[in-house]
């Protein structure tokens, strides 16, 4: 018997902005360094959402994911990555290429000013927009 990804996993991944592997399962941020984190801040993965797993592995991952969530609520403040993208309005042509490549939907085209604006809360500083510009 082969374990397959759950029905509707593609729609869930699209909604939560989580990558899907070649095998159709959800992809973690880094298999060794961040095994229960997705690339979307605040969304954690465990068990068979990532790949076929047995019960002990699933329980271990679920404990890790729960620990990560608990650590978010341990402080009165949430801290954001200090590196975010910017826009030089003098050279921005307003083409929107950077908007289309941003994996976090942190960029929007201001139609009045004809330049791109960055939502600092959503931006994770990945640099995709700069590379595309």
Image (cartoon, rainbow, N blue to C red):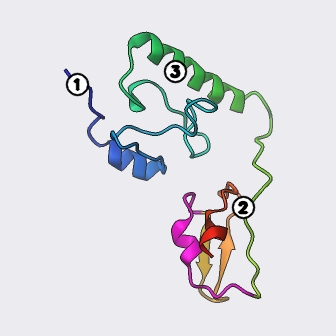
Q: Nearer the viewer, residue 58 or 51?
A: 51
Instruction: Give me the residue at 73% from left, 75% from top.
Output: 87
> In the drawing, what numbered circle is on residue 85?
none
Q: Earlier in the sequence, mark 3 or mark 1?
A: 1
Dot 3: within a 10 Å radius of its alpha carbon, few (fewer than 14), some, or many (20 or more) residues?
Answer: some
The location of residue 38, given as percent across then percent down, is 55, 40
Label 3, secondary structure: give it: helix
Quadrant containing the N terminus is top left
Kindly report the secondary structure that dominates the magenta region of the rendered protein: loop
The location of residue 96, given as percent across then percent down, is 56, 79
- Measure the alpha-carbon separation of dots 2 and 3: 30 Å
Q: Which residue is mark 3?
A: 62
Q: Which residue is mark 1?
A: 2
Q: Which residue is mark 2?
A: 120
Quadrant containing the C terminus is bottom right
Q: Determine whether 61 is above or below 96 in the image.
A: above
Q: Determine whether 63 is above or below 10 in the image.
A: above
Q: Nearer the viewer, residue 128 or 94?
A: 128
Dot 1: within a 10 Å radius of its alpha carbon, few (fewer than 14), some, or many (20 or more) residues?
Answer: few
Label 1, secondary structure: give it: loop
Label 2, secondary structure: give it: loop
Instruction: Give me the residue at 67% from left, 88% from top.
Output: 113
Count of numbered circles on the image: 3
In the image, is residue 100 part of the stretch drawn in magenta?
yes
């Amino acid at each position: 018997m082969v374990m397959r990804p759950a029905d509707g996993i593609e729609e869930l991944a699209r909604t939560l902005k989580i990558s899907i592997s070649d095998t159709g399962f959800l992809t973690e941020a880094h298999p060794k360094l961040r095994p229960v984190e997705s690339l979307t801040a605040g969304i954690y993965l465990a068990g068979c959402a990532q790949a076929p797993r047995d019960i002990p592995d699933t329980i271990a991952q679920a404990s890790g994911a729960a620990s990560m969530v608990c650590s978010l609520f341990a402080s009165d403040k949430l801290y954001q990555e200090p590196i975010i993208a910017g826009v030089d309005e003098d050279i921005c042509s307003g083409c929107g290429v950077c908007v289309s490549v941003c994996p976090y939907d942190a960029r929007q085209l201001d139609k009045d000013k004809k330049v791109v604006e960055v939502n600092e809360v959503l931006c994770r500083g990945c640099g995709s927009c700069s590379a595309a510009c």
